[in-house]
Image (cartoon, rainbow, N blue to C red):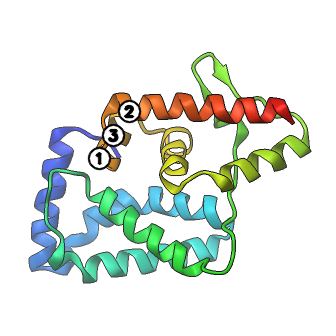
Amino acid sequence: MSGSSQDFEDERVWIEKSKRDKRQFKPLYDRYYGPLFRFFMRRTDDTSLADELCSLTFFKALDGLSKFKWQGKPFGAWLFRIGTNELNKHFRDKKPIYVIETDKLNCADEKIEITEQDHMELLKELLDDLPETELRILELKYFEDQSFKEISKLLGMGESAVKMRVYRLLSKLRTQLKQS
């Protein structure tokens, strides 16, 4: 998922074609299936459930495509909103599971190092307590390897605001881990 103006223009064209002929949805599906599947895998740690949630998300997106209005933002932002709603429906009475790759939680010279299992459990608890937007920012940055610019476009935030939130979140997590 890159964020060039040509990519956005391609998406706009694909969306318009898909509104007229559902078979034209394939390029959007191909572009977003991998990131959406990884999003669900990190939340569920269950391949078949992640695949089912992907299917539901794409079905709902395709079904609601006629209502989609192009606003110059990536189609993925709308798609992930649908996916998040589907995930929330699934976990109404359960807490989601987060799969954490600690080697990916680093930021230039700032790192969160976790060596003991109890610290890993604490990090999972801390991530569970984060608001959805903050957790999504960390996921996009460290698990989806998105640039600050791409994240800002996906979430409709300024690039500097995204950077500030990432650095503050990492600092907050590091402080909380050291205190335990």
| Mark 2 or 1, nearer chain start | 1
Compared across the picture, whether 76 is left or right of 103 comes to left
Mark 2 against mark 3, which lies toward the viewer? Answer: 2
| Vertical position of residue 146 compared to residue 74: above or below | above
Label 3, residues with CA under 10 Å away: few <14, some 14-19, many ≥20: some
Q: Mark 3 = which residue?
A: 152
| Vertical position of residue 29 compared to residue 49: above or below | above
Residue 161 disc label: 2
- Whether the residues at callouts 1 and 3 have beta carbons within 8 Å, the answer is yes
At 27% from the left and 40% from the top, the residue drawn is 3
Mark 1: amino acid: Gly
Residue in front for this viewpoint, 21 or 16: 16
Secondary structure beneath dot 2 equals helix
Compared across the picture, whether 67 is left or right of 126 comes to left
| Mark 2 or 3, nearer chain start | 3
Mark 2: amino acid: Ala
Secondary structure beneath dot 3 equals helix
Return the x and y of residue 42 as percentages of the image width and height: 62, 58
At 57% from the left and 80% from the top, the residue drawn is 90
Return the x and y of residue 16 as percentages of the image width and height: 10, 67
At 44% from the left and 78% from the top, the residue drawn is 55
- Where on the picture, by quarter, is residue 171? top right
Label 2, residues with CA under 10 Å away: few <14, some 14-19, many ≥20: few
- Where on the picture, by quarter, is residue 29? bottom left
Residue in front for this viewpoint, 30 or 90: 90
Secondary structure beneath dot 1 equals loop
- Whether the residues at callouts 2 and 3 have beta carbons within 8 Å, the answer is yes
Label 1, residues with CA under 10 Å away: few <14, some 14-19, many ≥20: few
Return the x and y of residue 81 as percentages of the image width and height: 38, 65
Q: Mark 1 = which residue?
A: 156
